[in-house]
Amino acid sequence: MKNEFIERHLNMNRRKFLSQLSLGVGSLALGSLLIPDIFGKGAAAEDAAFIPGMPHFAPKAKRIIYLFQNGAPSQLETFDYKPKLRQMMGQELPASIRMGQRLTGMTSAQTSFPLVGSYYDFKQYGESRAWVSDLFPHTAKVVDDICIVKSMFTEAINHDPALTFFQTGAQQGNRASFGSWMSYGLGSENKNLPAFCVLLSRGKGNGQGVYSKLWSNGFLDSIHQGVQFSSGENPVLYLNNPEGIDMANRRQMLDQLAALNDQSYKEFGDPEINTKIQQYEMAYRMQTAVPELTDLSKESDDIIKLYGPNCLVPGTFAANCLLARKLSESGVRFIQLYHQGWDQHGNLPNEMAGQARDVDQASAALITDLKQRGLLDETLVIWGGEFGRTNFCQGKMTADNYGRDHHPRCFSIWMAGGGVKPGVYGETDEFGYNIIKDPVHVHDFHATVLHLMGLDHEKLTFKHQGRRYRLTDVAGKVIPGLMA
Amino acid sequence: MFLRYGRLTICFLAFIAACNNDGAPGQQEEKLPEIVDYNFNIRPILSDRCYACHGPDANKREAGLRLDIADSAYKALKESPGAHALVPGNPMASVLYQRISSTDTSLRMPPPSSNMTLTAFEIKLIEKWIKQGAQYKPHWAFVAPVAPAMPAVTDKKWSRNEIDHFVLARMENKGLTPNPLADHERLLKRLSLDLTGLPPSAERMDRFGKDTSDAGYEKMVDELLQDTAYGEKMAIHWMDVARYADSHGYQDDNYRSMWPWRDWVIHAFNENLPYNQFITWQLAGDMMPNATREQLLASGYNRNHKITEEGGVIDEEYRVEYVTDRTNAFGKSLLGITIECAHCHDHKYDPFSQKEYYELFAFFNNVKEIGLESTVGGPETYAKKPYMEITKEDLNGVLHFINKQDTNKLIVSVMGDRDTLRKTYILGRGNYDNHTLEVQPETPHAVLPFDNKQYPANRLGLAEWLFDKRNPLTARVFVNQQWQEIFGRGIVKSTGDFGMQGDLPTNPQLLDWLATDFMQHGWNIKRLVKQMVMSATYRQSAVVSREKLRADPDNIYLSRGPRFRLPAELVRDLVLQSSGLLVHTIGGPSVKPYQPKGLWEMATSGRGILASYKQDHGESLYRRGLYTFIKRTVPPPSMMIFDASNRDQCEVKRSTTNTPLQALIMLNDPTVLEASRVLAAQLLQKDNNIPHNIQQAFRLIVCRTPQQQEVAVLQKYYEQQQQLYKQHPASAAKLLQQGEYPMAANMEPSAWAAMMQVITTIYNLEETLSKT
């Protein structure tokens, strides 16, 4: 990978040099079609400290697949085993543990905070002997390939700001998304595909919507915005030709178009016209490349068995995992999945079982599949939500039913591949309420992931409204313990 | 292994760095200016590289050294009292110079850990500046503009108005000459798009084509300024500024009814309400003596921000968020300053303290509102208190411009203050619950102190302060935004940042002349716009020669006309207008045209009436782009792909990208395909002459007569397509199914489909979507 890194520098440098000799954006498009502004007029080009499209040092991972569990799955029914909560079932949360933590408007009026243990049992797996709940039997089987981080924490206690924080590094404000930063920072590996793709699915659990601002380019050029993909008939918006026009006929139109646009270029000399011609060619190539890629019908039986039969149903999490693997394999830099429905304020045992069924097999299959293709080393897979859930019950508690409110002070995510050290990282107290060892803030998480991608989070900046913005805002530190 | 490659990498990086310095054209030729100017040559360097640690932020200041103020920079250094950062006239004695030129990395400034460096050229500039006396000047934007004298120009014939004198002087200085006048047809397209957002109608093209005189041009300008489409065009930018949307934003993102405010904006522009009143009503319409219903409605400007309906939020956290949004929008859009940077700490570059932020915040902090008024619900939640109900009486009277078609109750959020003053505190680190010092309403001193004797300490007083003749920013910021909308790039490129980190004006005299002239003539917006489009600068051809592209790639010297891709709304407008589909109704509730299926459904909490997209039918499919429904969390994709604002917060400048996704929209969006089908039928029904039809379509869409060769290419394409569809009638039938507009009768399918393909091709021409 280091050899390649040097080669890219050379390549990039050659391109930059050529682009400065030639005139403006137009000619650049020849080199990097989806990112035509990569060394162009963008403000960042003025910054000597950072050249977009190039890592700062040899990366461990080339690509990211982020399996976002939207709504915030409870850490206490997934990976953070707390037998004490079962023992103290129904007893009050001690004030010494709560320490004045603020509550959402949904439980702030509650007079009592009865502790509630996991409805589901936990067992230990793998060489790491990590505890995994019975809801995740498939994940349990790949436990030695993943790093469970039990000590994540965040600052927000409501969905919108917490999600926005995870995706843009700030709770408020129209900032660039994680994937947009990757697109800006590292560019695209595949000139027929966008660098940042987004896949949505939804479970039956209590839902909290996603918002396209989560994959927005913010202040970066709109070329870096996430492009929504799906399996099925219309994989990318506006990709399909209308009925009655086949690819051969589309080609004919584009030929006329190129001839006429070229004439216009001769008259006006505006390099944007040349860029336009190139963008139409790129669009045409996408029309061929994308359907081939998103067609899951030709997958082998082994693959379908691995991901589960749902992977053939467009729009399911399983189909999205399989599609993510294919996109990633084709060089898409950042693939963001969102699986909605993890907001269990009530009816938690029942809803979580459904949500886990949606995601467990396919998440584990993705790890196995990447591994068998020799891609896990260079692909970073991340699984987790926007915050954790309270150890006390929200609403009415019965023997087999309860709910949990939002909890920012600790929660669990897992990461795998791409230079991550498998195992268990961090520890919470026996109540699963506070972190007692190795806390990882959202900014630290971002800094670490950027580091794995070969980017220094303090150097990956974009100057906007007079200020150099970072994904990690003004904080964040790389966590060496998470890296192999 | 690692070491070996590691070293190699370092070698390569060094090589690259060397290439960057040597390879960049222009840099070698760069000469030090005769007189080094603090504002134009030095401050940008100091601000960008030094102020973060040696600037206005008292809490982050290193070694007690402050470089943004002359006295502090000349003073003996705290850490070595015998030395001075700056010794005017003597670089070698100036510690600043010693440190920036030091080869010792432990001494060198900026320190390597900051990831900042100074180039050799920048160091030389600073050296020369110190030699010449290290003279500081106040930041240009914080000094009130004074009407500059007309500069002398060599070419006495070219200029048509004052703008041209300033532009030409710069051009001549750079050794550039202006482009010739744009050809008549292209000029009308440019003018029509800039003033109305619509391509010229065939009738206007005919009329304008006949009268090529100067008087004829002016007549057309006046006519377009009187067209009601002018107000719609002007409203587009203002809706970005005001973060207008049809949903509340945040988690559930349910419906809101702010559209009557948008109707007012269109009305106000068409009535040519002077800018000072336009803004005063929006900031403080509710507080004006004997406020009219119209003024109250205008104050809705400050209620366009996002409002949460997420159950369980902490009220005060969100209420503070709303006040913050208003404060930031005020700074960015009206003052062109990044006051938001002082939300959590003193500003790092500009002289705005955190205290001053909350003093400004205090003006907006007294609204009768709470953070979470209601969760997703029925019509009573579509506006949040304080709101006004639009009555029948209003509609028959002063609010007649509101396009309300039904009899349902209609409420609009507006401003309204509490009777008792809510106390305002500096919020520690910007946290809503971290009250520190109490503050009173005040304005940033560096801009213009707030005169408590002259103005009331409320939003009305704030508006008066804004339009005080001594205010250095208000007029400059607005004329610059208008310049940007017409010339594609502001005289100050960073439209929302006139501070230390912002771009310097490319033609400061022109900016000041425009600003002072604007103030002297009663803040008359139409007059300002007319001035710009009447200039010879504007009327130049947009052709760019290789020489000019090399000498001035960004057209900073304006030696050619503006040539830019149309903004998102205008792309739609052009398609609908040229095909005859456009419904010219002004205002009313926003509409939901064709949109790819499933977008809202895939990203929703499932609550509220916007959980699924219910596409409109009939006339609502053919309204102008500015009426397309904006659901904040899932804004219309065809708009976003063409760089529209998602209305998350105040925006004063859009980017103009050029991407394959835009190509896919123009090739496959049913809006474009339907327009092609409808226009094809119209033309074929009138006339069977194919070359003539092609010419007609071309003229309607590209707004000029095609050249013979262009017609020839398209005619050949037509014939080939007709052959194809004759052989494949089923394909033709399918292609012609695009859109809901009724099918034309008695049409020959292969000819129709072929003409449709020709027209789609014309819609996809680069020139079509460009202001040329």
Image (cartoon, rainbow, N blue to C red):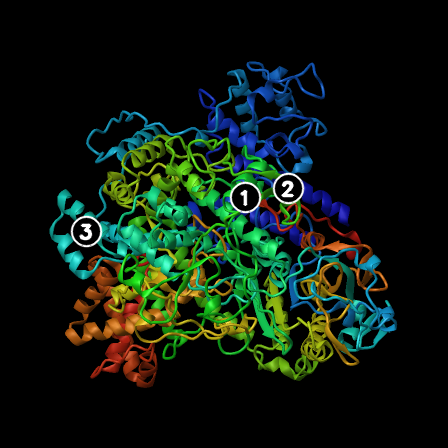
The percent position of residue B438, horizontal first and vertical second, equals: 61, 39
Chain ID at mark 3: B
Residue, far left: B210
Please, is residue B387 above or below residue B79 in the view? below
Name the secondary structure under disc 3.
helix
Gap in angstroms between the C-alphas marked 2 and 1: 37 Å
Of B141 and B108, which appears nearest the observer? B141
Label 1 resides on the chain identified as B
Comparing labels 3 and 1, the label whose residue is closer to the camera? 1
Residue B576 in view here: yes
What residue does disc 1 label? B340
How far apart, in angstroms, are the residues tagged by discs 3 and 2? Answer: 60 Å
Task: Count residues near mark 2 (Cα–Cα under 10 Å), then give few for <14, some for 14-19, many for 20+.
Answer: some
**B408 with respect to B449 (left or right):** left
Q: Dot 1 lies on which element?
A: helix
- Residue that numbered label 3 is attached to: B223
Q: Looking at the image, is mark 2 or mark 1 earlier in the sequence?
A: 2
* Amino acid at pointer 3: Glu
Identify residue for label 2. B13
* Residue under disc 2 on the same chain as residue under disc 1: yes
Where residue A69 sits, quadrant-wise, is bottom right
Write the residue at 55% across / 35% down: B352
**Which quarter shows the N terminus of chain A?**
bottom right
